[in-house]
Amino acid sequence: MVNLLKKRQSKQTGSVLTTFAIATFSLQILVLILFIIQGLNIRQLSLRKPPNFVQMIDGKTPTVTDELARDTESISLFVSKTMTAMFNWSGNLPPQNIEEVAKPKPDPGIQVRTLKGGNRNVTTSTWIASFAISEDFRKGLLSAIAELTPPEVFANNSSQNITAQLVIKRLYPPQKIAPGKWRVGMVADLVQTKRSDNRRKVTAFNKDLLVRAVDYFPYPLSENSTDLQKAIYSTRTDKLEIYEIRNLCLIDEYNSPDDQTKQCLNNKSNSNFLR
């Protein structure tokens, strides 16, 4: 009788241990599955594109829009800011503090290779602003600007020094040509001035700029980042880039019918600025 009771107790104990082991194992599997799901969710959040916001005219809370949508005023401001920075050649570095505003540092320029094979300098502000240009277009554009930039821009001698300024006369409203792509016409003059006698050379600079929306991931900069790195970083915050520049075909109206525009472009086989 005693042996029978011991056998029953042993069976019950083994059954309880087996049930406990199965329950523990199942719980561990469940926890592992939850960890995997959580990890996948975190990865999806890290890869998700940041939403775009547009400030409403009446001051309401910014509204999330399509990732390719951009406000027309923002596009115009981006084009104006980028082109002005690229073609305003003062011979000085952009000021970083109040002291440098009163006493600017001379710009040594940044050397790039020209289309003809030689090396020429572009201004530091031009080089920084060029990061708002698409990567496949940026190198050729810098080479062309280097050939346009007079060496006297970097001369320390005031009698030889030349400055330049892009005077934008008119910036046409952006025309949407495809989802996330716009065409912006610019009528401007590139005014070069010799400081010694204020003689000026005015060159018409009428261009068609093709702009497109791009992704931007705001990676934080370290505290010891240089002013140059911060400036380059800031050029991409508009989530826009210029991917082509053409000579602007001036006709009666910029927003003319498509057949007139095509005819105007066809009559100028060399209408592209660089391409």
Image (spheres, rainbow, N blue to C red):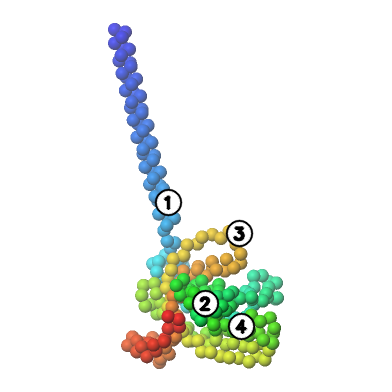
Mark 4 and mark 3: Cα distance apart in space = 35 Å
Q: Position of residue 217 (x, y in %)?
A: 47, 62
> Disc 2, disc 3: CB below 8 Å?
no
Q: Is residue 14 visible?
A: yes
> SS of the residue at dot 1?
helix
Q: Position of residue 83 (x, y in %)?
A: 52, 79
Residue drawn at x 58%, y 59% as measured from the top left: 222
**Where 149 sits versus 216, above or below?**
below
Q: Quadrant of the N terminus?
A: top left
Q: What residue does disc 3 label?
A: 223
Which mark is first along the chain, 1 or 3?
Answer: 1
Residue drawn at x 68%, y 73% as measured from the top left: 100
- Which is more foreground, mark 4 or mark 3? 4
Which mark is first along the chain, 3 or 2?
Answer: 2
Q: Residues within 10 Å of mark 4 (few under 14, many from 20)?
A: some
Mark 2 and mark 3: Cα distance apart in space = 30 Å
Q: Quadrant of the C terminus?
A: bottom left
Which mark is first along the chain, 1 or 2?
Answer: 1
Q: Amino acid at mark 1?
A: Ile
**Where 5 sits versus 237, above or below?**
above
Q: What residue does disc 2 label?
A: 142
> Disc 2, disc 4: CB below 8 Å?
no
Q: Amino acid at mark 4?
A: Pro
Q: What residue does disc 1 label?
A: 42
Q: What residue does disc 4 label?
A: 151
Q: Is residue 198 left or right of residue 261?
A: right
Mark 2 and mark 4: Cα distance apart in space = 15 Å
Which mark is first along the chain, 4 or 2?
Answer: 2
Which mark is first along the chain, 3 or 4?
Answer: 4
Q: Position of residue 152 (x, y in %)?
A: 63, 84
Task: Answer with the quarter of the image where residue 212 lies.
Answer: bottom left
Residue drawn at x 42%, y 57% as measured from the top left: 47
